[in-house]
Image (tube, rainbow, N blue to C red):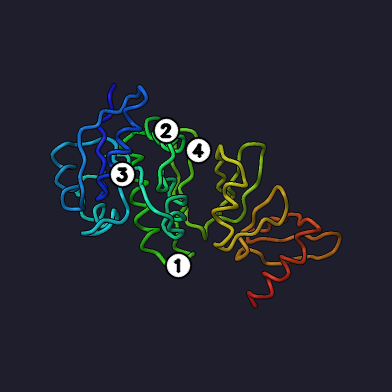
Amino acid sequence: MSIRTLVIDDESAFIGNLESILQSRDSSLELVGDARSVEEGLQKIDELEPELVFLDIQMEDGTGFDLLDRCERKDFKVIFVTAYDQYAIEAFRFSAVDYLLKPVVSTDLWSSVDRAVANIEKSRVELQINVLMENIHSLSKEKKKLVLREADVLHVVRLEEILWCAADGSYTAFHLEGGTKIIVSQHLKEFEEILDKNGFFRAHRSYLVNVNKIRKFDKREGGIVYLDGGSALPVSVRKKEKLLQILSHLL
């Protein structure tokens, strides 16, 4: 089965390079066209009905986000292409959306393509794009949402719902308010990189805690944090002072 693929970017040289890389390997992608602007991109999406779109963030007549806001159909997988923009990249990672940094490296490109092909289901695509747009427009940490992949299910959770995350080998268990537990096949380190600047702290090699859910910190014998709902988690000796500093700033 071939996957109808559209490239939307205002740099002709980049489009040529991307198409050359895509054509260099036998894959299931079928390049059906390209567009050089937001307006042309919207037109080509309607005309060509792509299943996969490589979408530039910054174009002369607007952004890739403008295109998605105006696009009536969101039943295609998106791989964003962008120059370095930390805020946008954070939103991509929270929403489990694929992105490529310019200049594009072929190994990164094929990794993104392989993930896109494996997760081409349309229902997932629209959900992830909707969460991405909410995160892009939200400046509040409390309103940010995180997409978690559990087997064949996508969960959308608010950061404020998460009590703590626990490492379990190559898996991470998310413990939410109300007793809900979601297990994701990603290392805790990956989520630490995403959540570190959003109110979470790696209090122990096995635990990442939502600082705003801490109700008590017992400093004796290394330390134990007590969270909303009564859960108690150990704090490693070397993380004790850093946690005290963080908590002091909450006062």
Amino acid, disc 1:
Ser
Q: Residue at x 36, y 58 (%)?
A: 134
Camera sees residue 111: yes
User: Picture quarter containing residue 249?
Assistant: bottom right
Q: Looking at the image, is mark 1 or mark 3 earlier in the sequence?
A: 3
Q: CA distance from mark 3 to mark 4?
A: 35 Å
For mark 2, does the 10 Å Cα neighbourhood hold few (<14), some (14 to 19), or many (20 or more) residues? some
For residue 215, above or below residue 183: below
Query: In the rendered structure, are the residues bearing label 1 and label 3 in contact, judged by CB atoms less than 8 Å apart?
Result: no
> Is there a contact, CB below 8 Å, between mark 1 and mark 4?
no
- Residue in view at x 37 percent, y 25 percent: 25
Tell me the tag on residue 110: 2
Furthest toward the right, the residue is 221
- Label located before the other in sequence (2 or 3): 3
Secondary-structure class at tag 4:
strand
> Circle 3 is placed at which residue position?
14
Is 14 placed left or right of 150 in the picture? left
Foreground tag (2 vs 3): 3
State the count of labels.
4
The C terminus: image quadrant = bottom right
Badge 3 density bin: few <14, some 14–19, many ≥20, Cα 10 Å: some
In contact (CB < 8 Å): disc 3 and disc 4: no
Q: Quadrant of residue 177?
A: bottom right
On-image quarter of the N terminus:
top left
Q: Position of residue 63 (x, y in %)?
A: 28, 57
Task: Find the residue positioned furthest to the front.
Answer: 13
Name the amino acid, label 2. Trp
Calculate the distance from the C-alpha at mark 1 to the C-alpha at mark 3: 34 Å
Rendered image quadrant of residue 155: top left
**Percent x, y of residue 214:** 66, 64
Q: Which residue is mark 4?
A: 150
User: Which label number is shown at residue 140?
Assistant: 1
